[in-house]
Image: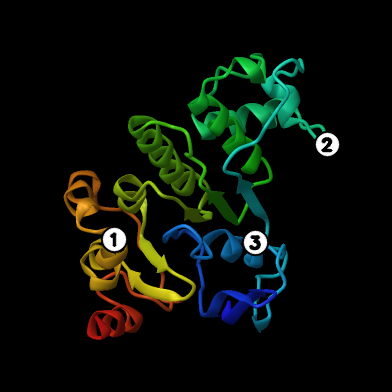
Amino acid sequence: MKGLSVSFGANRVLDSVDFRIDRGEIVTVVGPNGSGKSTLLHALIGGVRPSTGSVRRAPGLRVGYVPQKLSLDATLPMTVRRFLGLPRRVSRETAQVALDHAGVPGVGRLQMSALSGGQFQRVLLARAILESPDLLILDEATAGLDQPGAAAFYRRIEEVRKETGCAVLMVSHDLHVVMSASDRVICLNGHICCEGTPEVVAEAPVYRALFGEGTKGALALYRHHHDHHHGPAHGHSHDGPTEQTRKAAADA
């Protein structure tokens, strides 16, 4: 994504956004309501046309998408396995592998209406990874889950990344949990305010101005070390603040 701006009428939602994500990365986009997070995702997958700028995707890029919520008629009889086979059928073995990866191996015969909130979201995750995506996108995928449920879901996302090697792009309000599961965090408020490792972003004055000090202690509680390494092709660094972060700090 290069110099991307998106306007709806006279309202400019995104302004001159530069963004890239590489295979194996977990990147989280945070920002207040109305900051353009979902618009960013929709522009990436082609659902929103840029006003200016461009989006370039790897040839043949496969994308898996986990929405914030999916409403199903509770009276509609549909097993998990049947749900995974829509709109086109998949083999029992393929469906089971996806459920295994999503961390719910034993729910295939259950009715969708009988699932807990956490199980339902993991089934949506299983559906998203059925096609072995290169990029997995999650738009507020833990909305409605309690804190332990959200933390468990994000740990499973890390396992999916480790098992499949896909890139993961997440939008979330669960700052205290989701940042701990990320390699890189982007703070968005119509434009990229700051960007870097969770520790760097949490210290940035512009981030604190938007979210306060509340996530700093929780970040230390949840943060852990990743055991993977990015190759030399990556154009960003996880070791310190980016130029945007330094500029934001200087401006603040």
Residue 125 visible? The answer is yes
Mark 2 crowd level (few <14, some 14–19, many ≥20, 10 Å Cα): few
| Mark pair 1, 2: CA separation | 39 Å
Which of the two labelled residues, at mark 1 and mark 2, occupies the earlier sequence position? 2
Disc 1 crowd rating (10 Å Cα; few below 14, some 14-19, many 20+) is: many
Estimate the spatial distance between the alpha carbons at disc 3 and disc 2, rounded to whole Å. 24 Å
Left or right: residue 227 versus residue 111 is: left
Q: CA distance from mark 3 to mark 1?
A: 24 Å
Residue on which disc 3 sits: 42
Q: Which residue is tagged 2?
A: 88
Amino acid at circle 1 = Pro
Q: Position of residue 200 (x, y in %)?
A: 24, 68
Residue 217: percent from left, percent from top: 16, 50
**Residue 141 image position (x, y, % from top left):** 52, 42
Judged by depth in the image, the label closer to the viewer, 1 or 2, is 1
- Looking at the image, which is closer to me, 244 or 89? 244
Q: Where does residue 8 sit, x and y in percent of width and height?
A: 68, 71
Q: Amino acid at mark 3?
A: His
Name the residue carrying label 1: 198
